[in-house]
Amino acid sequence: MLDQQMISGETWDQLARTWTERQLLEFPMPVGQYHATALQQKSLGVKLADDNGGLRHR
């Protein structure tokens, strides 16, 4: 989604198998918000706490 700046038809079709129309319509919004937050934090040089290994630590 982030690389292509859109959700592909194939992905929509797969999600539509188990998601409601409302879920499909709402899905891009939180993804976009998380992406915007990440861009802001990275641009401002916000660092993780010393005891936070981030997602790569998992």
Image (cartoon, rainbow, N blue to C red):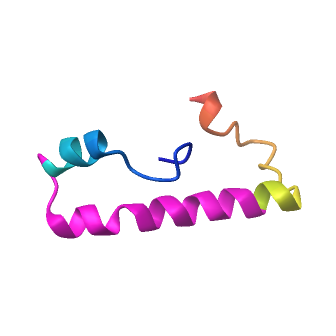
Task: Count numbered badges in the picture.
Answer: 0
Q: What range is drawn magenta here?
A: 17-40
Q: Is residue 50 above or below residue 39?
A: above
Indicate yes or no whether the magenta region holds residue 27.
Answer: yes
Q: Quadrant of residue 34?
A: bottom right
- Quadrant location of the C terminus in the rendered image: top right
Q: Is residue 53 above or below residue 42?
A: above
Prevailing secondary structure of the magenta residues:
helix
Indicate yes or no whether the magenta region holds residue 7.
Answer: no
Q: Quadrant of residue 51?
A: top right
Q: Residue at x 35, y 45 (%)?
A: 8
Is 14 on the left-hand or right-hand side of 17? right
Q: Residue at x 70, y 36 (%)?
A: 53
Is 53 on the left-hand or right-hand side of 10? right
Q: Position of residue 9 (x, y in %)?
A: 28, 45
Q: Quadrant of residue 22?
A: bottom left
Q: Residue at x 28, y 68 (%)?
A: 25
Q: Position of residue 43 (x, y in %)?
A: 84, 58
